[in-house]
Image (tube, rainbow, N blue to C red):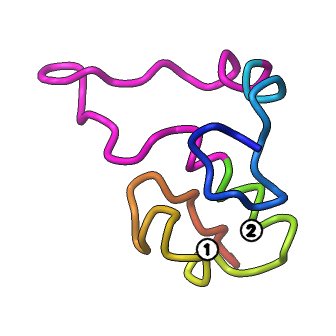
Amino acid sequence: MGSTGGGYPSDLADEPWALVEPLLPPASAGPKGGRREKHPRRRTVDAIFYAVRTGCAWRQLPKDFAPWPSPSAPPTPSLR
């Protein structure tokens, strides 16, 4: 399990995280480059994997993930 994770089976270990991290867009660094990230990217990715693996809604994630609603939460798909 990841060194920053909550210990869930869906958390990425360090080796897979090293493969995923370079695929993410660069972080905004503020002050003119956008808002600084409020939640670590690795925890956001772990939350996505948790939701996919368990089938829970983003709102039902355990409290140690980013709170709902969160700017780092993935967008909700539109039904239209």
Question: Which image quarter is the N terminus in?
Answer: top right
Of the numbered discs in the image, which one, if any, rests on residue 37? none
Q: Residue 44, relative to residue 60: is it above or below?
A: above
Q: Residue 72, relative to residue 37: is it above or below?
A: below
Marks 1/2 in contact by CB < 8 Å: the verdict is: yes
Q: Is mark 2 on a helix, strand or loop?
A: helix
Marks 1 and 2, how far apart at CA: 6 Å
- Residue in the picture at 40% in, 63% down: 70
Q: Mark 1 points at which residue?
A: 58
Please tell me in which quadrant of the rendered image residue 62 appears: bottom right
Question: What x and y, as percent, mark residue 9?
Answer: 84, 59
Q: Is residue 59 left or right of residue 29?
A: right
Q: Is mark 1 on a helix, strand or loop?
A: helix
At label 1, counting other C-alpha atoms closer than 10 Å, the crowd grade (few under 14, some 14-19, many 20 or more) is: many
Q: In this view, does 74 lie to the left or right of 33?
A: right
Instruction: Kindly identify the amino acid type of the residue bearing the numbered disc 1.
Output: Trp
Of the numbered discs in the image, which one, if any, rests on residue 51? 2
Q: Which of 57 and 54 is in front in this view?
A: 54
Q: What stretch is highlighted in magenta?
A: 19-45
- Residue in the picture at 40% in, 47% down: 39
At label 2, counting other C-alpha atoms closer than 10 Å, the crowd grade (few under 14, some 14-19, many 20 or more) is: some
User: Is 42 within the magenta?
Assistant: yes
